[in-house]
Amino acid sequence: MAEVITITSGKGGVGKSTATANIAVGLAQIGQKVVAVDFDIGLRNLDMILGLENRIVYDVIDVMEGKCALSQALIQDKKTPNLHFLPASQSKDKTILDKQKVKALIESLKEQFDYILLDSPAGIEGGFEHAIFWADRALVVVTPEVSSVRDSDRVIGIIDAKSDKATKGAKVQKHLIINRIKPELVENGSMLSSDDVLKILAIPLIGLVPEDERVVSATNCGEPVIYDKSSISGECYKRIVARILGDEVPFVEFKKQGGILQGFKRLFQ
C-alpha cells in the first residue's frame, strides 16, 4: 500500500525541502514510484531544488480546484523517471486549502505511487495542519539549536493531536532527522549534541546529516546532493532512505577536523 510521508519542521530554514527532495530521489532511484508534493503554498522552493521550475504549467491548487487533471500537473523527473513532482501555487495562500480536497488528491496519488512525500510549510498554521492530517509517517527535520528543537517539540505535539490517525485513537509514526550538524561546535559546547536533541524530543532517530557546502551548490544547480557520490550528506540521505524501507543501517558519529574525515571514510566502506 502507498505510504504518505510528511516532511515537516517547527521553524523555517532547517533544510526541510532539501530533505524532501533528496529522500524522494533516493526512493525513486531504488525502484519505488514516488511523488513529491510541495504543500508550501505561496512560497514555492521544492521545484528549484529538484531543478524542475521551468517545467511547471499547473500546480496543486489547480488540481484541487478542478482546473486541470492530475496528470497535467504532475512533472516527471527526466533524470530519475520513477520520481514525479506536483508543485505548489505561488499566487494563492494556504487558506485556500480544503481538508476534503486534500484527501481526494492524496487518494488519487495513492493509486499511482508507492510513496507520497508532502513537503510541509514550516510552523503550525493551516498549511501545516493540512500537510500532516493525512500522514502515515512524519519526518521532523531539526537543527541542533535550542529554537529549532523547541519549535519542533510543539510540532510533534500537534501531529499527535490533530492528525486523522489521532481522531481514530492511533498515532502517526514519527521520526527525527537532525540536520546541519557541525561537529566542532558540538564538541566545544556551542551546539546541542544529537543525544541532547533526542532526549528533548523523545522520538526515534532516522537520520543524521552534517553541515555540507555541497548542499548549497547542489541546490543552486537544481540537482539534489544525493546524486553526488562523493558527498557525505548525499550518503546520509541514502541511509535515511534505507531506514524508511525498514533496513537496519548504522549511524555515523561525526567528529571535528581529522575525526570527521575518519567518519567519512567509514561511511563509504
Image (cartoon, grey):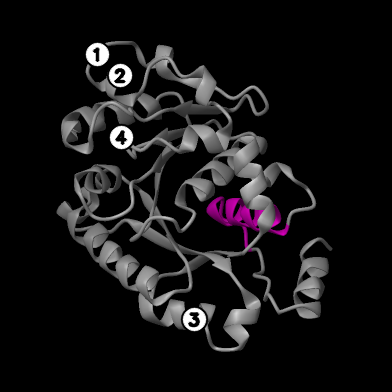
Mark 2 crowdedness (10 Å alpha carbons): few <14, some 14-19, many ≥20 = many
Position of 153 relative to 12 (above/below):
below
Instruction: Using a 10 Å C-alpha cutoff, classify the residue at mark 3 as few (fewer than 14 neighbours), some (14 to 19) or many (20 or more).
Output: many
Residue that appears at 23% across and 34% down:
93
Q: Position of residue 205 (x, y in %)?
A: 50, 68
Q: Is residue 59 toward the left or the right of residue 245 in the image?
A: left
Sequence-wise, the earlier of marks 4 and 2 is 4
Segment tinted magenta in the rendering: 232-248
Question: Which structural element holds mark 2?
Answer: helix
Residue located beneath label 4 in the image: 42
Image coordinates for residue 92, horizontal then vertical, percent: 24, 28
Mark on residue 77?
Answer: none
Kindly identify the amino acid type of the residue bearing the numbered disc 1: Gly
Q: Is residue 237 magenta?
A: yes
Q: Is residue 134 left or right of residue 82?
A: left
Q: Residues within 10 Å of mark 4 (few under 14, many from 20)?
A: some
| Label number found at residue 192 | 3
- Asked whether residue 111 is in view, the answer is yes
Q: Nearer the viewer, mark 1 or mark 4?
A: 4
Q: Which residue is mark 1?
A: 66
Asked if disc 1 and disc 4 are in contact, CB closer than 8 Å, the reply is no
Determine whether label 1 and label 2 are within 8 Å by CB: yes
- Quick check: marks 4 and 2 in contact, CB under 8 Å? no
Write the residue at 60% across / 38% down.
25
Q: Tell me the distance, in whole angstroms, between the alpha carbons under discs 2 and 3.
A: 42 Å
